[in-house]
Amino acid sequence: MVLGQEQTAAITRRWALALTEIESVSGGAGEAALGPWLRDALAADPIFAGAECWSFPVREGDSRHCVAMLLRGSGRETLILTGHFDTVSIDDYGDLRAFATQPDALAERLKLRLETAAHTAAEQRAKADLTSGDFMPGRGLLDMKAGLAAGLAVCADFVADQSRSGNLLFLAVPDEEVNSVGARAAAAMLPQIARNKELDLVGAVNLDAISDDSEDGHRGRVIALGTIGKVLPTAYVVGVPAHSGFPLAGINAGALAGAIAARVEWAPELTDDSAGETPGTLPSLLSLSDGKPGYDVTTPGTAFATFNVLSYRRSPETVMNSFEALCREAADTFLEGLKKRLAGTRSLGRETVLDRPITLYRYEALLEKAVAVDANHASLIEQFAGELAASSLSLPEQCRRLTERTWMLSGFSGPAIVLGFGSIPYLPTNLSEAPAARKLHQAAEALANSAQSQYGVSLKTTGHFAGISDMSFFGEADEADLAVVAANTPMWTAGIRWPAQGGVAGVPTINLGPWGRDYHTPLERIHVPYGFDILPRLLIDLTRRALG
């Protein structure tokens, strides 16, 4: 470290507060304004004199910008420091909303409130934390503007080192909290940046935060060597509607969707353990609704279910195959159960539709059939997709509506289940055995092993970042794994707008950021001694090891 400890801590604190004080809620005007502001502020800061600062829009016609700063040393090897500057909404602060992005003012008001209103365990912990003086609140301070600030302190130390080797590329992106448009734009731009600037991108450090409720924060002081992946499998269920006074004449789409939900919930077949390191997160239903626009006595003709599936190493194709098998099993069991309930009753022998098979389709087969019926259907579906993309509907709802329209054009009849994906895919990343990845891995392990003696804190490595993150787009994921997602996500082209190539950067990526508690809540707060003092020093050390 070239700068003194007090200097790096002061730089980190200054940038952390400056970034936090700019409200940058995802989708809001502040998010769009922060990018150009940060670009200009970096260019104007004497500390970064001589650095190359620029910004670029996340896509054509979008006012949100990614911000880049290149700091040159010697050679071509370049390490990326990256993080997001958007936040979740501040509306949950209620009457303290005006102070949500003013950490010092918010701290005083929160302490005063918690003196008499610390009812829950979380509030009692927050009261103790804020009273200690070791924690600072503020929307986005922990998640993740303090991480960006620590990265800027690393940049400042790097510039001050006259014998620096390698280069640093600082990248700040918007939209991580919604659809990761910023990280996806930056990942797609990296090959061009590397080519134009004559850089070899040897690694990246994501600066995202870890939430930790342990007494000493040891679970938050980690270097994550990869990140978990996430896909959102969907089931569009088509039944045979009937008057509820004559239910045997139909198959209830809502009941069938419920059977699928019950089978998929916590299914071990969709649970991916992290090589014994961490128990796999169980899959779970995220939404279930029927397609009826209002109340009547007709049984639901359609229903739509979405499921959260996380994985450490499984590909989306593997997930889809398992999901399809579970839906097939649920449908067969559902029909057999209904048949058993009729056996031995006076209803036996009455005409039903239970002998009609429930057919499973993937969305790609549904689309193919719709276009085969009439080639003009392709343009109709494309036009409707564009209308949905311009709406304020969520991506899963857009996918539901486009599946519904495609079903109507296909000529298929129920009962049936259409399988697909309904949101942005996050691929799992893991460090490979490539030389650059091994070097970054060794640097992380060496730093963790020396942290106690050098910095007075425990630090450990872990296989994966605890939640979905922008690492999925910067890291060493295989973009070929997205083929099944692209083919079966109805809004892939119009809504998600994944680039034809370069959507995954393929750069060895790890995560080292601040720790704190309760992010995404009004009690969000950072552990100040670690986040402002120790973290930047750890990152400086890591940078030197990775580029040395």
Image (spheres, grey):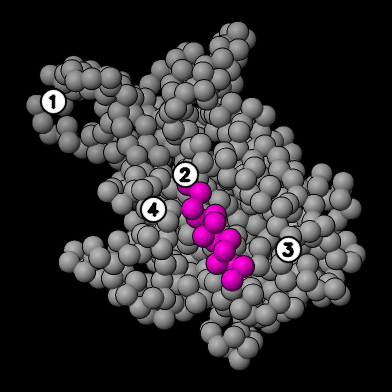
User: What are the residue bounds of the magenta stretch?
Assistant: 10-23
Is residue 259 among what the camera can see? yes
Disc 1/disc 2 C-alpha distance (Å): 58 Å
Element class at badge 2: loop
Residue 165, horizontal then vertical, whole percent: 85, 71
Magenta region, mostly helix, strand or loop? helix
Residue 481, horizontal then vertical, whole percent: 65, 46
Judge depth for marks 3 and 4 and give the one in front: 3
The reply to whether dot 1 and dot 2 touch (C-beta < 8 Å) is no
Mark sitting earlier along the chain (2/4): 2
User: What's the amino acid at mark 1?
Assistant: Ser
Quadrant hosting residue 331: top left
| Residue receiving disc 4 | 100
| Residue receiving disc 3 | 47
| Residue receiving disc 1 | 347
Judge depth for marks 1 and 4 and give the one in front: 4
Mark sitting earlier along the chain (2/3): 2
Element class at badge 1: loop
Quadrant hosting residue 123: bottom left
Residue 244, horizontal then vertical, whole percent: 16, 21
